[in-house]
Image (spheres, rainbow, N blue to C red):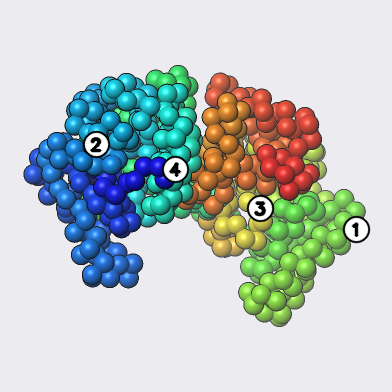
């Protein structure tokens, strides 16, 4: 590095500033911290004591190492003590006015070559930098919380940031053991711009009573493998912080999907800010505690008793149909698997046998249990063979006309009182129900792929679904070891309605040349702890499937922000569909 950085100033000793100071001191740097007053210094010192104590008890630091780390940090209440530092990182509250004042003062105190970095998560670095005589040496250095643990740092350059400054700050972040991504100056940068639109959408779903907070959170944890559900994550971030970030993003983007959900403002006004106040979407046993206590929201609706289910029909021979048949058979239920030909039926049973054999080899199933499960599956070709089942699950192609034909055929042969279910992931369940003379018996049971592995099932009730049919669907999910979440019959249900607008936003970000696909993927995996980045996931799902779901969402809600990104449409037209064709957003 051209610039020798040995002493760093940190302004602000809240959770974030204290975490950054710890990261710097861990790397052997001397740190000068500045707070408003002695009370702020004491709070910051407390954050550092607590964090390093945890590292000590967790075996990540030894006692001499901890003492050395804390010894490298000096505390002050005067900006003038930063006169000799080599770099300054600002981590004060998200107020442009406050940050502007601090940077104006810093400009007078520090040497002309010193670089200023702001840890802002949403404000414009350009607007902050113009309050100095050195805007070319002002960058964003957005750490993620908790800074000692999270690896991602977003390095934000403006149109006037000197290229060598960016290079030096990237090298400095790497020296700290972080994973830097370089991006331009726009609200939310990468991670927050993609994350907070998704979080806001979840709040709107909850606000509209489309699904409960528990079901919204469980859907994203079990359906997408996210480390936290959206409402629990908002409680952790702080509802006031989330509202500020969304508001800043909206004023830059004018995208209605970034306009903070009204419920957020109501909760903030009521002092329900999340974990830090002990109550947000959930109630906690104390302020700053992660432990959720029993809710004061009590359901007044007694669920209807479920109908008995011992024999299940599955219509279809694809991956989803065979997976569902396997799940039920392993749990001791008799399964009638209906295919269009005997060859297809036998091929499906062979697929189930192959899957069961794998489970035996891996020690997850005994040979006896595998043989018993396979014996419970009866392949058939006539709909009449489903006449006496208690539940039929349709898992044919995602075409409404095909599904309606199946439901019309089932309506004629299946006994009265049996539950008819569709596994559709995007089509209206009520359209399937309308093909029968018993719409009250029809429900959505959206399994996730692969069905034997994925724990989530979305139970989708239409305006016509009978209460005991919903109860039956829930009881069946419990019986086969799945986690049921409940929602109404609208495009995307919970998971796809939250997931695909986020994926679409990522495509728009790439389309605007704001960041590279790899950097966006890195930001979401490293910064937000997601199992896959958006472009990796799109390539796995299939760009044609993703486009179809996005179009369905747009046609249902007519939200401008849900309109499929033109780049996604162009890639599909060009035949770049993802992993299945060897080319998508990436080449395989």
Mark 4 lies on residue: 170
At a point 66% along the width and 53% down the height, the residue shown is 449
385 or 90: nearer the viewer: 90
- Which of the labelled discs sits on residue 342, or is there none? 1
The answer to which quarter of the image holds residue 36 is top left
Question: Disc 1 and disc 4: Cα gap in Å?
Answer: 62 Å
Relative horizontal placement of residue 552, taking residue 190 as reference (left or right): right
Look at the picture and state if 350 lies above or below 360. Answer: above
Quick one: label 1 or label 3, which is nearer the N terminus? 1
Quick one: label 1 or label 2, which is nearer the N terminus? 2
Question: Disc 1 and disc 3: Cα gap in Å?
Answer: 25 Å
Q: Secondary structure at mark 1?
A: helix
Q: Secondary structure at mark 2?
A: loop
Mark 3 lies on residue: 449
The answer to whether the residues at label 2 and label 3 have Cβ atoms under 8 Å apart is: no
Q: How dense is the environment of label 2, judged by Cα within 10 Å: few (below 14), some, or many (20 and up)? A: many
Extreme residue toward the left, this view: 38
Could you tell me residue 506's position as x and y percent?
56, 34
Mark 2 lies on residue: 92
Quick one: label 1 or label 4, which is nearer the N terminus? 4
Could you tell me residue 339's position as x and y percent?
84, 53
């Amino acid at each position: 590095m051209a610039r020798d950085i040995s002493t760093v100033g940190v302004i602000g000793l809240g959770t974030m500033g204290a975490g950054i100071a710890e990261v710097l001191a861990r790397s052997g740097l001397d740190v000068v911290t500045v707070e408003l007053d002695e009370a702020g210094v004491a709070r910051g010192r407390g954050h550092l004591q607590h964090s390093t104590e945890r590292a000590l008890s967790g075996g990540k630091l030894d006692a001499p190492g901890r003492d050395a780390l804390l010894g490298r940090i000096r505390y002050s209440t005067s900006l003038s003590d930063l006169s000799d530092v080599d770099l300054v990182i600002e981590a004060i509250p998200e107020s442009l006015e406050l940050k502007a004042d601090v940077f104006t003062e810093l400009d007078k105190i520090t040497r002309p070559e010193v670089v200023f970095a702001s840890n802002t998560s949403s404000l414009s670095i350009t607007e902050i930098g113009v309050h100095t005589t050195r805007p070319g040496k002002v960058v964003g250095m957005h750490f993620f919380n908790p800074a000692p643990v999270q690896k991602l740092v977003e390095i934000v350059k403006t149109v006037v940031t000197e290229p060598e400054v960016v290079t030096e700050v990237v090298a400095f972040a790497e020296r700290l053991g972080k994973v830097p991504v370089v991006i331009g100056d726009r609200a939310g940068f990468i991670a927050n711009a993609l994350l907070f639109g998704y979080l806001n959408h979840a709040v709107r779903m909850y606000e509209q009573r489309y699904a409960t907070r528990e079901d919204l959170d469980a859907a994203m944890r079990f359906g997408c493998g996210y480390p936290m559900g959206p409402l629990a994550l908002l409680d952790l971030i702080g509802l006031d912080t989330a509202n500020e970030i969304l508001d800043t993003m909206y004023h830059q983007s004018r995208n209605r999907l970034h306009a903070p959900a009204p419920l957020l403002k109501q909760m903030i006004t009521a002092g329900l800010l999340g974990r830090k106040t002990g109550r947000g979407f959930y109630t906690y046993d104390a302020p700053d505690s992660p432990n959720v206590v029993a809710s004061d929201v009590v359901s007044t609706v007694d669920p209807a008793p479920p109908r008995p289910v011992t024999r299940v029909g599955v219509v279809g021979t694809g991956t989803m149909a065979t997976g569902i048949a396997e799940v039920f058979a392993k749990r001791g239920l008799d399964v009638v698997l209906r295919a269009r030909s005997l060859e297809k039926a036998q091929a499906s049973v062979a697929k189930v046998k192959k899957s069961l054999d794998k489970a035996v080899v891996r020690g997850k199933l005994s040979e006896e249990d595998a043989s018993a499960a396979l014996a419970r599956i009866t392949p058939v070709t006539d709909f009449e063979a489903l006449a006496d089942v208690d539940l039929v699950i349709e898992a044919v192609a995602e075409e409404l006309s095909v599904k309606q034909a199946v439901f019309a055929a089932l309506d004629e042969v299946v006994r009265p009182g049996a539950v008819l279910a569709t596994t559709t992931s995007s089509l209206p369940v009520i359209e399937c129900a309308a093909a029968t003379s018993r719409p009250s018996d029809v429900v959505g049971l959206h399994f996730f792929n692969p069905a034997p592995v994925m724990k989530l099932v979305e139970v989708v009730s239409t305006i016509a679904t009978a209460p005991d049919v919903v109860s039956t669907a829930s009881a069946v999910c419990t019986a086969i070891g799945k986690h049921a979440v409940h929602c109404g019959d609208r495009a995307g249900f919970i998971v796809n309605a939250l997931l695909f607008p986020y994926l679409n936003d990522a495509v728009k970000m790439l389309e605007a040349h704001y960041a590279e696909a790899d950097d966006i993927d890195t930001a979401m995996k490293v910064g937000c702890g997601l199992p896959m980045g958006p472009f990796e996931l799109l390539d796995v799902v299939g760009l044609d499937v993703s486009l179809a779901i996005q179009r369905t969402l747009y046609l249902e809600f007519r939200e401008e922000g849900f309109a499929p990104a033109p780049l996604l449409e162009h890639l599909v037209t060009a035949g770049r569909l993802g992993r299945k064709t060897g080319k998508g957003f990436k080449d395989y």
